[in-house]
Amino acid sequence: MQAPVPIAGSGSRPPPSTRPGMSRKARERRNHALLHIGLIIYFTVSLMPFVWTFLTSLKQSRDVAAAPLKIFFQPTLDNYRAVLFNQYSDDSALARVRVDIPGSFMNSLIIAGGATLLAMLLGNIAAFALARYKMPEREVYAFFFLAFRFAPVFVFIIPMFLIYQEIGLYNTHLGMILISQVIAIPLIVWVMRSFYESIPPELFDSAALDGATRMQMLRQIALPLAAPGLAATAVLAFIACWNNFVFPFLLGAKQTQTITLATITFIGYEEVAWGMMTAAAIVTIVPELILAMLVQKHIVRGLTYGAVKE
Amino acid sequence: MAILAPPVRRQRAMNKGKVERDALETADIRAGRLMMIPALIIPVLLAIVFFFGFYLTLRNRRLNRGDLGFVGLENYARLLQDDKFWHSLSLTLKFTLTDVGLELSLATLMALALSQPLRGIRIYRALLIIPLMTPPVVGALVWKVLYRSGNGGFFNYFLWEAGLPMQGFIGDPSQAIFSLVAIDVWLYLPFVAIILLAGLQTLPQEQIDAAHVDGANGWQVFWQIQLPYMIPFYIVALFFRVIDSLNIFDTIYGTTKGGPGDATRVLAVNGFETAFPFFNLSYGGAIFVALWLLCTVAGSLLFIWVKRSQAT
């Protein structure tokens, strides 16, 4: 079979059969079976790292360190007790690795949540203006925002490091929220612009005849109509801020330590606290997955800044 | 502005057939500009910071010793003769080419598979985005667990069981960069796949059916219909993936931190280390200006291509 499996038999009309002995139905069934096998293999490979991470997080430290690898073991919740409730057992050799995961989780929530709220407020007004009003220079604004998505963040981080220490924003939640705008605003402006552009302009024209102000049009027409997109965009902005590693890493210290940063501190110079690290990784990922599943429908548009609509 | 405004107004006036709409239009434009301001404050400040950052690279600013004065373009001259810089540049390009090449080709297969009317397709699509939502640093840690050396490591255990030689993966200088490509492909293949899938789904089925009726086989349909149709979608994917790969930092910092030796010391890792652990903020900054230039050139080329493909 030299033809790639996916295409053959995809038409609703029968493709000219290359094998007269086989009916269209039979060919299609065979192709689909092969596809299922291929996809199942892919997803087994692609999800296996998570499964293994989860299994590792249930191991006692002697099982984690065991060589050869232990596939069957006595599961324990010790690692979760450690990372979720700061209950570190003293008998392990890794007892001195103490990372405040609950505190870091709160920091992540405050920073990603605060940054998303602020950026939604600022970004939506701009997105609406870009979609609705024909400023001759509007593509310049749009391009200016986009430039931040594609500039290496370090170009800002080095000077910001000095500035933050000077003006007292270093290692503060406010500082993290402000710098995170550089991730959240461009995303929100671009994605929401594409949602607002898909609203028929006649709706606004008739509202204008009724004497509605611009802010009323945004609040009473645009926001309700774009509500699903709004939610999806907020979630994606939140995830982008939550996943960020470099800002809290270089512009913050203990007080702003986020959960991604906390997870990496389980790696010591001499040893890695694998069990606790994997438990922390699970704690980091699960909330994001739940959020992501809720907005699956708009994820393509969101991740491509509105360039691709589904 | 004044030069650009007339065509817009004329078009509007023709549409509405009302001249008095001109006044409203002007008010709209003024309001639109006002509404841009809140979102622009922080980005504009950061653009100023960018110039401050560039100015820093013209001085000799040390993290541990303060500002040692103005040096002009000395940091950039040093860059040109720095073997470590050229090594990290070529490593960055090698990483980006392998990474993006693999992602585009594998994602094409994935998108073709998921565009079929399979049973349970929704489950597959939901599963697809899982790695994509993982923080890159955490994704890297997850793979660090799998790559562990000795037969206590996941991959090595199976190699050992099968009687094959165990591998160093991220610990082996010759394999490290490709082991990192594997992590990045795992993270971002779904991203490219969902873009291409969205593209495939907008291709009218009649075109494919008509080709089949004309006797085209699957290969021909792919090369002559689907692939040309999807070019704009490939460009969007390229746009994001090329620039993010050039900037790769998180996954490397979570696994090898540039090692072993210099085997994975890409530009971003090199610049970070120079600026912070080695205290040379100015020289580290110069490395990032070089990286910024690289991204700008790549981004501009792709942007022109996007605009051109949208026009046709």
Image: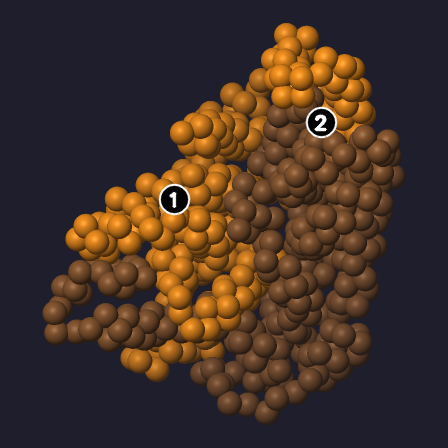
Chain colours: A brown, B orange
Q: Nearer the viewer, residue B138 or A43?
A: A43
Residue at 77 percent across and 43 percent down: it is: A221
Residue sitting farthest toward the bottom:
A74
Q: Local crowd at mark 1 within 10 Å, few (<14), some, or many (≥20)?
A: some
Q: Is residue B121 above or below residue A201?
A: below
Specify the subunit that label 1 lies on: B
Residue A146 relative to residue A104: left or right = left
Q: Local crowd at mark 2 within 10 Å, few (<14), some, or many (≥20)?
A: some
Q: Nearer the viewer, residue A226 or B108?
A: A226
Q: Position of residue B11 (x, y in %)?
A: 61, 17
Q: Position of residue A71 (x, y in %)?
A: 48, 86
The reply to whether residue B247 is in sight is: no
Q: Is residue B231 above or below residue B294?
A: below
Q: Is residue A15 above or below residue B284?
A: below
Say if mark 1 contacts mark 2, CB within 8 Å: no
**SS label for mark 1:** helix
Q: Position of residue A36 (x, y in %)?
A: 36, 73
Residue at 62 percent across and 17 percent down: it is: B14
Camera-nearest label, 1 or 2 = 2
Q: Position of residue A195 (x, y in %)?
A: 65, 43
Which label is found at residue A133? 2
Type of amino acid under label 2? Tyr
Which label is found at residue B163? none
**SS label for mark 2:** loop
Type of amino acid under label 1? Met
Which label is found at residue B230? 1
Residue B8 relative to residue A69: left or right = right
